[in-house]
Image (cartoon, rainbow, N blue to C red):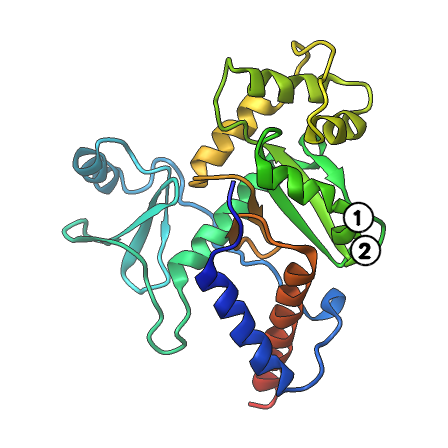
Amino acid sequence: MFPISRSGAVALFSALLLASCADPLPDTATAVSPPPTLPPALPAGAHPDIRARLEKLVGVPPDALREADAPGMLEARWGTEFAYVTADGQHVVYGDLLDLQTGEALTERSRKAMRLALLDELGDDNMIRFVPDGAQNVITVFTDLDCGYCRKMHREIDDYNQAGIGVRYVFYPRSGPGTDSFRKAETVWCADDRKAAFTSAKAGKPVAGPSDCDNPVLQEYQLGKEIGLRGTPLIVLPDGEVVNGYVPAPTLAAQFAVKALQAQQATAAVEGG
């Protein structure tokens, strides 16, 4: 639907300039930080009074409640929206939590972990994969078969693969259930050769065949809404970070190289004390 933003391109270019003054970029296969993980959500019966107060305040109960990184607080989540409530249930604040000592965006870490958990729950079997052997990084792309920039991205799938980037596609027909675009996605999934049908549809060719087989299109569409998708393509990086819009393969590969360098420097700093 749209390319990478101007501000995002400027930020990436600045990062590359900084990287050019540092040590050579490391191998992205071995140096990227591990994806974020979080403590499990509290049992559904935990803190019933707090859950009831939050439901009364927001209108719906939180999707999850867990111990926050800030001592004495709980983290409540509704989709991609977060709030923090004191353990006695007397005070609540909406917004993002930051660690003032390290500068880490703790709520964004929670969002990343949430996205990865939801994608793991969906599973590889419900995605259309263009992932070569030995891919150094695998991205997950929410895509619309009729979106112009989504089509442009898939026309360049060989460029991504040659750059060591595998692509897992998840359907998000923007027009919604019951529309031609939605049925087209279902037809692609029902095809004997899904990858060939997907590529053909991305080229604007008609897709024939049934659309009533058991398919994940509705589940994936709802998943896109749950993670806050506003346009396609939406790229989920291996660490759970999202990139809105089309990004050329060389730019994405450079972004992975910068992330790898940052991870290497962080590891060296910890080991060096």
- x then y, percent, for residue 133: 85, 50
Query: Residue at point 56% right, 20% down?
Result: 182
Q: Which residue is disc 2 drawn over?
A: 162
Q: Nearer the viewer, residue 84 or 240?
A: 240
Query: Residue at point 49% right, 69% down?
Result: 11
Any mark on residue 117, and which? none
Q: Quadrant of residue 101?
A: bottom left
Q: Amino acid at mark 2?
A: Gln
- The furthest residue to the right: 133
Q: Nearer the viewer, residue 39 or 175?
A: 175
Q: Are marks 1 and 2 in contact (CB under 8 Å)?
A: yes
In the depicted structure, whether residue 273 falls above or below residue 128: below
Relative to 74, is 144 on the left or the right?
right
The quarter of the picture where the C terminus appears is bottom right
Q: Quadrant of residue 238?
A: bottom right
Query: Residue at point 81% right, 19% down?
Result: 192
- x then y, percent, for residue 185: 63, 22
